[in-house]
Image (cartoon, rainbow, N blue to C red):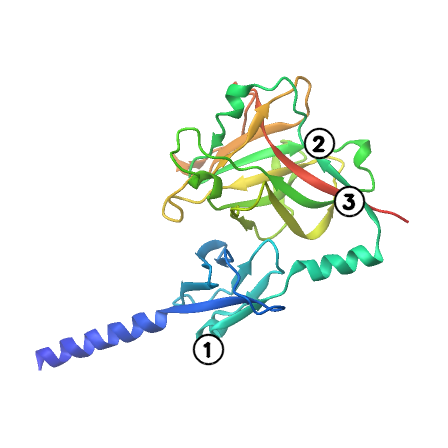
Amino acid sequence: MMNLKKNTILILFIFISIHSFSQLQVYDIVNKSPVENVLIIQDHLLRATSDKNGRFIIDLTNKKDSVRFYHMGYKVLNVSVNDLHYQKDFFLEPIENELNEVTVTQNYKRLEVYPVKRNINFLMINQPAKIWYSSQIALYVPHTMEFSEYFIDKIFIHTMKGYWDKDDSSKYAPFKVNIYDVDSITKLPGKKLFKDNYVIQRSLDEDRIEVSLFERLDFPIEGIFIVIETYNQDQSDVRPAFRRIKKVKKSKYESYFKSLLVKEGKYSEWTSHSDMSIEANYYFGLELIKFDN
């Protein structure tokens, strides 16, 4: 009788395990080919990444949250966990289709915005900023009259190999990014301008990461912050590293750091790189567009 109970429990455990994890596959809806490096996001966390065959495995025990399929070249696909139980193949629609339609019907000018690079400090260029787990970094991008009538369309991010790293893992480590407004009192990062963070991972063939925004943003007169957030050590075993440049005198661009860990019952505050005696800025940028009449 005891052995029978043990066998029943074992069979039940195997049954639950099989149904808790499922192998799924994601394809391009146009040519039906598998899509590699699709980020599978649930509860704002990176749960899986599709392989070269478009396959990924995900835990389906959490039935409350929907799952988001994110890839730089495709429209975001949101599916319910219930769909993941009964559907094994998913199809992504390329963004190019939408962009081509816009290009045909509207003319617009493009403008890339970066902190000014002068008097390059080669030592600093060769020592990128490798960011701690559970942290945020931010670059303040000021508004100028030149940006009037322009909309924010993309974020540019330059990741690098960590200075002491033996491989390129830091260059391709995942992280989150969002745009924040400027707090009217503290002049520090205030509120997110997008409800959900973008979950990003540089692909092997990219010279830089180009994050196409879900919707174009007006450029606030107060400026904006590009804010990057790293995962904790349980979620990612590699810390990302980002390019930085020597800060130009009188530059209004400013970089900040903040830990998301609670210390002595308190969260840390944003700290300026200037206060940390670091004369450098993160080399992040924006693509602005202006529609012609």
Name the residue beneath numbered marker 3. Answer: 289
Horizontal side of residue 106 vs 98, given as left or right: right
Single out the mark in the foreground, 2 or 1. 1
Name the residue beneath numbered marker 2. Answer: 142
Name the residue beneath numbered marker 1. Answer: 86
Q: Quadrant of the N terminus?
A: bottom left
Q: Nearer the viewer, residue 182 or 92?
A: 92
Q: Assess disc 3: are there few (<14), some (14-19) or many (≥20) residues with their C-alpha within 10 Å of its C-alpha.
A: many
Q: Amino acid at mark 1?
A: Tyr
Q: Earlier in the sequence, mark 3 or mark 1?
A: 1
Q: Amino acid at mark 2?
A: Pro
Q: Earlier in the sequence, mark 2 or mark 1?
A: 1
Which percent across, then down, holds residue 250? 69, 18
Which percent across, then down, holds residue 123? 51, 20
Q: Secondary structure at mark 2?
A: loop
Q: Secondary structure at mark 1?
A: helix
> Distance between the Cα atoms at labels 3 and 1?
42 Å
Q: Earlier in the sequence, mark 2 or mark 3?
A: 2
